[in-house]
Amino acid sequence: MPDRGPRESGTTGLPVRHPASLVPAWGGGEAMKKANERLSVLILLMAFTGFTMGFPISNGSAQAAGESVLPAADKDYVVKLGYYNCDHMTAAPVAKDAGIFDELGLKVEVIGNAKVPEAMAAGQMDLGYIGFERTVRAYLKGCPIFIGAMNHLGGSYYLVLRNDIYEQYQKDRRVLLGKKLALGTEPEKNSPEWVTFTGKIGLPPDGKNYETFNMSDKDEFLAMKTGKLDGYTTCDPWGSMAEHDRSGRIVPEFTITRMPSGKWGACCVLSVNRNFAEAHPELARKMILAHSKAIQFIYTHPLRTAEIFARNYSVPLEVALMTIFRKTVAEDRTMRWDIHEENVREAVAWNLGTKTLDQAAATNDYTDTRYLREAGTEDFERFIREKVDPVFPLGMSYPDWKKKAYAVEGKAFQAAL
């Protein structure tokens, strides 16, 4: 997810895409090919200098953090957990509203639309959900931050165009030049999705070629709806919201699920303040366990998750359902807690290739899996295989998924919301 700072981040007949069909063709011309060639040596070096720890990491030690007793000094500690108002980070409000923090004996202040790295650097934030490249940038600037668990691999990031602009775009890609687009500050430096997309369709990535704006996702949606913007890049729910109320259309070729190699990368992570983790290791482990339980809840209780999402993001339940469907079925199982070396390397290579990162330290400098190893989390693949695949298989249509989501909770199905 691009570094655009704190932002607030459908159709009832949502098209169902097989995960493979969601992978866009990698474009960008000779310049991008040469950049990829130059990266090959760097990636090989990273293979030898990066991950000295064991990967993948998900299941924990014999004594799960959830079964352990908090030290006396931790019992009254209120953990500060930040997240941006983006659907990728739904685990934060889910852990709170589904009672997961209470179940684990945790006192947590959940802060939406938080400036996570800045707050961590100031000692005012203990954990936070943020984009991968933003985490790396914060670490390189001296922030005491590390990746403690994975959160979202990719996908569910959109370019939304107003209906009339979308129709023009279908005929001529160059119609975007000079348009009023909320792309954030210097998209050519901060949005690998935008750089990749413009390279693929033959447009310049530099923001100077467009009338660019930087605003919250919710404000972008409202500005486009009232004709003040031609389009915007966004997380959900504001992509699905535009399609739900028919004020705009998602440009399908913009959304990237997998990396240019065809492998998964790392969109956003659960980051941890190192000072907090070292002072309160048991709390750090329990927070990571809570994160994993929240993701399990999202997969196994999608209707209840959507209800929580709708309340916290102030959107219709239908939009919330569409949002959860995309990340758990339509785009593959993109929400997960286990860290894999390959995902992080792919994300680094992509950001370096698009020049949205100038440099990246050795990966194990800003990835610390010991708290995840000791948290007592379940094996992600086994969880999906045993608890999710039999109920909500990949390839399931949105209407069928929605019916099953209601059935799981024993509620009467509502076709139209």
Image (cartoon, rainbow, N blue to C red):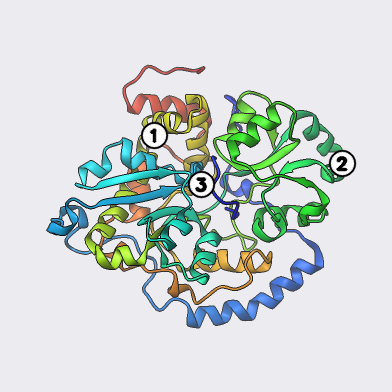
Name the residue type under label 1. Thr
- The residue carrying mark 1 is 305
Which residue is drawn at the image coordinates 84% and 35% (left, top)? 168
Q: CA distance from mark 2 to mark 1?
A: 40 Å
- The residue carrying mark 2 is 172
Which residue is drawn at the image coordinates 87% and 41% (left, top)? 172
Q: Earlier in the sequence, mark 1 or mark 3?
A: 1
Q: Could you tell me which secondary element the residue under label 2 belongs to?
A: loop
In screen coordinates, is 23 left or right of 344?
A: right
Which residue is drawn at the image coordinates 52% and 71% (left, top)? 140
Which residue is drawn at the image coordinates 85% and 41% (left, top)? 175
- Using the image, determine if residue 196 lies above or below residue 239: below
Q: Earlier in the sequence, mark 3 or mark 2?
A: 2
Name the residue type under label 2. Asp
In screen coordinates, is 387 left or right of 197?
A: left
Q: Which of 269/60 is in front?
A: 269
Q: Could you tell me which secondary element the residue under label 3 belongs to?
A: loop
Spot occupied by residue 189 in the image (x, y as percentages of width and height): 68, 61
User: Is residue 25 at least partly visible in the picture?
Assistant: no
Residue 59's quadrant in the figure? bottom left
Number of residues whose C-alpha sits closer than 10 Å to that of mark 2, classed few (under 14), some (14–19) or many (20 or more): few
